[in-house]
Image (cartoon, rainbow, N blue to C red):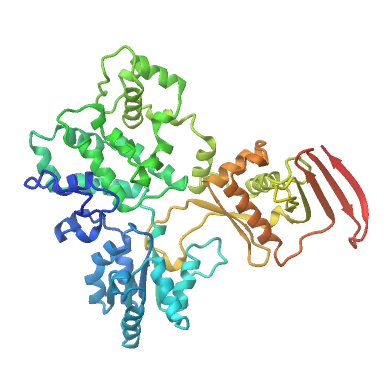
Amino acid sequence: MSGKVADSPQLAGEHDGSALWRTLAAAGPKAIAEALTDEDFARLHIPGDIEQFLAEQVRAGNSIVLTGNAGDGKTHMLRRVKADLEAAGAVVIEDATAGMRGDDPGPILAVWRDALASGHPFCIAANEFPLYQMRMKDPSAPHLAEVSRQCRHRLAYGDSMPDECATDVLVVDLSLRNPLTADFVDRLLDKILADEGLKRALAGISEPIARRNVELLSLPLVRKRLGALADRLVALGYRATVRELWIMVARMIFGQLGRGDYQSNDWYSEALFGRDERFDLTAALQAVDPAACSHPLWDAALEVRTPEVREGWVLRAPVPPPHATLEWEDFAALKRRFYFEHTHGHEVFDLADPDATDFENLLAGRRGSGRALVAELVDAINAAYCPVRFDSRDQHLYLWSGHRFHEQPSRSFVAAERVAAEQFSLEVPRLPSRLAGCFHYRPDHVALTARELPRAPRLRIDFPLWRTLRRLARGLPRKLIPERDVHRLDAYMEKLGSGQAGRRDTIWSVHLESLELIQVSLSEDGRRFDGVRTYA
């Protein structure tokens, strides 16, 4: 949400009803929902299943802990449903931090205990740290222990994780509800375009920029292409707050505030990809900017404006500057409009990163996640430690350990244990059944899980790690693996080897500089060498 605070000044439009949207378009990252009037609060609210879900849980006697990151909408949501919750008998605290005495959560815990003692559900919006402070203040409280357990198990994988609540308290983590999805962005656009205040503003003669942008943002093709960008950002691991999305949409409508013409800087597409260092979302959008994706055929056609690009626009072709060749800024602006509004616009991404496309398809269920893919990932993880190929590198995950000298990076690795690839499964996370019907969850990672091992060690594969593994399969040297991914793979090796013994019939030793691999076969009792084989 956004509010009227110091970095979001009130602009023109007080009398035509557009003041809220102009304020949003000029807002900064510290804009807050608490500053909204009740009328503006209602104008910004996007209804969803979560309101009914929370009310039903409270009517069933469950307490609710609404948690998440700053800007995820905790206070907004609890404020929205507070009347319904209180009508069902709940005691509601909208902000845990405001209810504390400094760093002491004692006052909140007292209210919580009194509510439970009198048989009333208790509802609170709290960040992770206040919840931690409550747990430390009263470590023996069963309801706080259950809150802690649910926070540790926010998602479910496969069918082996317990999904239900151990007590009558339910944690709803709004950080799992990434608003940066096609569905939510579409509903947000519907909300602002249907706003009566905005319609009154556009009826005047002084809003040619906003009127043209609204006309284009109402087109089904533009909305479809915008949704495709949002879904790809989610798959790549990006997220946004509701606050950021409202500010972004308002800017897409009003362009560069204060201008009187309709230059390319005022196009909705330029406002979308305009960089503002204060907002993480604007940096994320660079990853899906059509202007940054090269397509030789369409790039050449746009540059010289061939018949193929003079026709095929869903409404009308944008007017580029009257120059023989386009400057980069003008070309980028035209290409972005081409993506959103031309029938062939989606083709600008045909040559985009295939690893990103594969990962997006995997998360959406359009790519298989069976044994063949598990074998590919096992082979890629092995390649991170042993670049020399051998017959069973995709059939077992070898538990490699390195040798360091004088704190230098490991130059050789040894594996004496292995886990069969058949013991792993690739799982797409889901919401636990206790949260079924709360909101739509869009996964941003998959998990490679050794289900048959104690504690089922799990490797969380997000897009950066997925890309690294795909590059390893194509021959990426270990020295070029991002340090973050090396640490994650090393930690997974330790989890796999902790407390269990894999098969020990072979010892593998590889030297990264000479690229020599030695396979030592052991006797059945493991006391002598039966054979030695070298690979190079």
Out of 222 and 534, give the one closest to the viewer: 534
The residue sitting at the bottom extreme is 117
Q: Is residue 457 above or below residue 9?
A: below
Label count reads 0
Q: Is residue 491 above or below residue 127?
A: above
Residue 145, given in percent of the width and then of the height, sits at 47, 77
The residue sitting at the left extreme is 15
Question: What residue is rendered at 40% in x and 78% in y?
Answer: 168
Whether residue 342 can be seen here = no
Residue 244, given in percent of the width and then of the height, sits at 31, 49
The residue sitting at the top extreme is 324
Please give left or right for residue 37 compared with residue 162 in the image.
Answer: left
Q: Is residue 344 above or below residue 400?
A: above
Please give left or right for residue 175 compared with residue 193 in the image.
Answer: right
Q: Is residue 193 above or below residue 498?
A: above
Out of 400 and 344, give the one closest to the viewer: 400
Residue 307, given in percent of the width and then of the height, sits at 34, 15
Residue 411 falls in which quadrant of the image?
top right
Question: What residue is rendered at 42% in x and 44% in y?
Answer: 233
Q: For the C terminus, give its image quadrant.
A: top right
Residue 441 falls in which quadrant of the image?
bottom left
Please give left or right for residue 404 compared with residue 533 in the image.
Answer: left
Q: For the N terminus, give its image quadrant.
A: bottom left
Residue 151, given in percent of the width and then of the height, sits at 46, 68
Question: What residue is rendered at 16% in x and 28% in y?
Answer: 261
Whether residue 106 can be seen here = yes
Residue 270 falls in which quadrant of the image?
top left
Question: What residue is rendered at 81% in x and 49% in y?
Answer: 508
